Image (tube, helix red, strand yellow):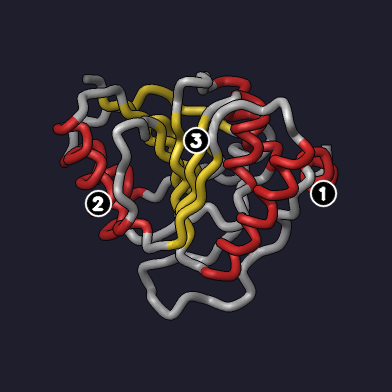
Amino acid sequence: MEEHLYDKLLHIKTGGEQKDFNKSLHYHRYEPTPYSALETLLNHYELKSSDRIVDFGCGKGRLNFYVNSVCNASVVGVEMNQAFYQEALENRNRYVQKMKNRRGEIHFHCCLAEEYEIAPLDNRFYFFNPFSVQIFMNIVKNILLSVEKKKREIDLILYYGSDDYIYFLENHTSFELKEEIRLPGLYEHNPFERFLIYRLSP
């Protein structure tokens, strides 16, 4: 199904890319995860309605609404760009109005990713190459501090995961690679077209 048709089905508007670049070199340009990639992810990776997934650099909320509609999971979007945050809220209003049978909560926070306070229910974290490894390291540290307070299984889902992210997780944390999901027809031409699932078991 084409991108705009998925948006129409969910009563949201999430297309387009970020035209202007962030002044900080630590934050990368916004680009939504293709629906076809999200479809592949959820065909191979189970998200339960009891899970709560946090999308860092959520933009207009595409992943949040898609996951909520397919899995009934609670979702949190963290976005530093005020304009994208406002569009995410507008999308939520339309989505909630039309999708009345949905379960699970949908929250959005407008803040820097490293300033988001990890909640005890947060257990799945999504990264589409949103920022530098320095910020990623800070967020992983915040996640680990949260796990110290409330033990639980944690999954990190990386799309277009950089070598820096992977090196850090595999050499400086207890996270272990649980699964690699390659996007058929794309991975063969671009090795970044895959999802990597890293798990921290309690």
Q: Nearer the viewer, residue 50 or 127?
A: 50
Residue that label 3 marks? 195
Q: Secondary structure at mark 3?
A: strand
Q: Is residue 81 left or right of residue 83?
A: left
Q: Could one spot residue 160 in this view of the protein?
A: no
Q: Residues within 10 Å of mark 1 (few under 14, many from 20)?
A: some
Question: Where is mark 1, residue-wise?
Answer: 4
Q: Quadrant of residue 146?
A: top left
Instruction: Name which residue lies at 55% across and 40% down.
Output: 106
Q: Position of residue 27 (x, y in %)?
A: 42, 66
| Image coordinates for residue 189, horizontal then vertical, percent | 62, 44
Alpha carbon separation for disc pair 3 and 2:
19 Å
Mark nearer the viewer, 3 or 2: 2
Q: Nearer the viewer, residue 6 or 130?
A: 6
Inspect this view and state whether residue 36 appears.
Answer: yes
Residue matched to label 2: 137
- The quadrant of the rendering that contains the N terminus is top right
- Residue 189, relative to residue 41: is it above or below? below
Instruction: Name the residue located 69 percent from the left edge and 52 percent from the top edge.
Output: 91
The amino acid type of the residue labelled 3 equals Phe
Residue 157 disc label:
none
